[in-house]
């Protein structure tokens, strides 16, 4: 069966070139590059999918989930960095923070805007592995437009739409970015669906790392449910400080899994989240496929068949569904893993009477 769902795309998503990252203080080549979505798109087109161009949307959509300060910073960071001369002296051609206004540093004092751009870089970033270069803003902004266009298609009656997008976004909170993410496209898509009249939207995040961004953004809301299945942060995995069962409440659900968990445990966890989201009016799937067996960024061991089965559970809800690409870094397997998940969602959808 050819893939029916539209694959929403923007060439601008290719413009973010991290050029590596700083991980535990050392330069690391990194794994989040433009070739990720290129290989996914190629596989999906070969499977019969139709590519739909993303439409531009107002910044108002961003401000429904992000603070103006974060949005303005991301928009201007590269040009301010360049103006300040850092690419020449000391020769850093990406925006990378070195100092953070940690609550323990500030004590009772309010944070104020620092003069040096090198210090400003720490105001909105929570790690050192999410560098900003000349194309980062354009790409992250395009990633949001891709997700918004997918949400619009679903609001117009398409049952499932897939946002083939990068850089990923699910670690970004209202006011801070990190984890190779800049703007939270999944969260923006959920708000868009709310705006289109879906009363309750569930975000189910199946990336190998907790969807801390949506959890934080929608913490005080009961119209956007946030659920995440991921490797247990207690076992030593990003985002380390969050993603525990102790954070669970009626509107938020974490299902942490032991390292080494394969198809059986992972598929059961996705089914549990799907069941939990059953009463929502629309679904956003934050589709990371880095839980895959050969993905170096997580110790989970899910196969393509596992992603297909997980997809069937989510599709089985029969909800209008926006699927947004998050992580997934095993380039050789990436296209096939995403295809398996999307086919599973389509197969799981109840037949229309
Ligand atoms: Zn991930």
Image (tube, helix red, strand yellow):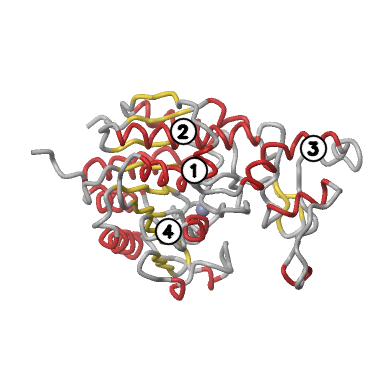
Label 1 vs label 4, nearer the camera: 1
> Secondary structure under badge 2?
helix
Q: Earlier in the sequence, mark 2 or mark 3?
A: 3
Q: Residue at x 47, y 67 (%)?
A: 259
Find disc 1 in the rendering and name its residue. Answer: 185
> Secondary structure under badge 4?
loop
Q: Within 10 angstroms of label 3, few (less than 14), some, or many (20 or more) residues?
A: some
Find disc 4 in the rendering and name its residue. Answer: 301
> Secondary structure under badge 3?
helix
Q: Earlier in the sequence, mark 1 or mark 4?
A: 1
The reply to whether dot 3 and dot 1 touch (C-beta < 8 Å) is no
> Could you tell me which quadrant the N terminus lies in?
top left
Q: Earlier in the sequence, mark 4 or mark 3?
A: 3
Instruction: Indicate the position of residue 87 as horizontal and vertical percent values.
Output: 85, 37
Instruction: Indicate the position of residue 243 as horizontal and vertical percent values.
Output: 49, 67
The reply to whether dot 2 and dot 1 touch (C-beta < 8 Å) is yes
Q: Is residue 233 above or below residue 36?
A: below
Find disc 2 in the rendering and name its residue. Answer: 146
Q: Earlier in the sequence, mark 2 or mark 4?
A: 2
Label 4 vs label 3, nearer the camera: 3
Q: In which image quadrant can residue 270 be found?
A: bottom left
* Name of the residue lying farthest toward the bottom: 246
């Amino acid at each position: 069966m050819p893939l029916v769902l539209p694959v929403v795309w923007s060439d601008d998503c290719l413009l973010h070139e991290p050029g590596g990252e700083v991980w535990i203080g050392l330069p690391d080549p990194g794994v989040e590059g433009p070739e990720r979505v290129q290989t996914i798109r190629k596989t999906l087109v070969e499977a019969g999918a139709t590519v739909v161009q993303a439409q531009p949307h107002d910044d108002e959509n961003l401000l429904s989930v992000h603070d103006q300060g974060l949005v303005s910073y991301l928009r201007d960071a590269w040009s301010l960095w360049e103006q300040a001369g850092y690419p020449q002296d000391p020769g850093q051609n990406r925006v990378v923070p070195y100092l953070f206004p940690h609550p323990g540093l500030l004590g009772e004092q309010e944070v104020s805007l620092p003069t040096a751009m090198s210090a400003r870089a720490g105001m909105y970033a929570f790690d050192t592995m999410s560098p900003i270069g000349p194309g980062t803003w354009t790409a992250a902004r395009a990633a949001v437009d891709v997700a918004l266009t997918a949400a619009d298609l679903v609001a117009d009656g398409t049952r499932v739409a897939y946002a083939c997008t990068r850089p990923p976004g699910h670690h970004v909170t209202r006011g801070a970015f990190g984890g190779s993410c800049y703007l939270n496209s999944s969260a923006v898509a959920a708000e868009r669906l709310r705006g289109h009249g879906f009363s309750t939207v569930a975000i189910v995040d199946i990336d190998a790392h907790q969807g801390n961004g949506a959890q934080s953004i929608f913490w005080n809301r009961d119209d956007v449910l946030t659920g995440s299945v991921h490797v247990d942060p207690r076992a030593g995995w990003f985002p380390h400080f969050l993603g525990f069962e102790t954070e669970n409440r009626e509107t938020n659900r974490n299902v942490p899994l032991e390292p080494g968990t394969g198809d059986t445990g992972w598929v059961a966890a996705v089914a549990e989240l799907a069941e939990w989201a059953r009463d929502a009016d629309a679904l956003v799937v934050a589709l990371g496929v880095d839980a895959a067996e050969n993905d170096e960024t997580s110790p989970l061991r899910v196969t393509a068949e596992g992603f297909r089965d997980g997809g069937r559970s989510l599709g089985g809800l029969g909800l209008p569904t926006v699927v947004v690409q998050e992580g997934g870094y095993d380039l050789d397997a990436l296209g096939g893993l995403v295809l398996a998940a999307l086919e599973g969602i389509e197969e799981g959808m109840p037949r229309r009477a």
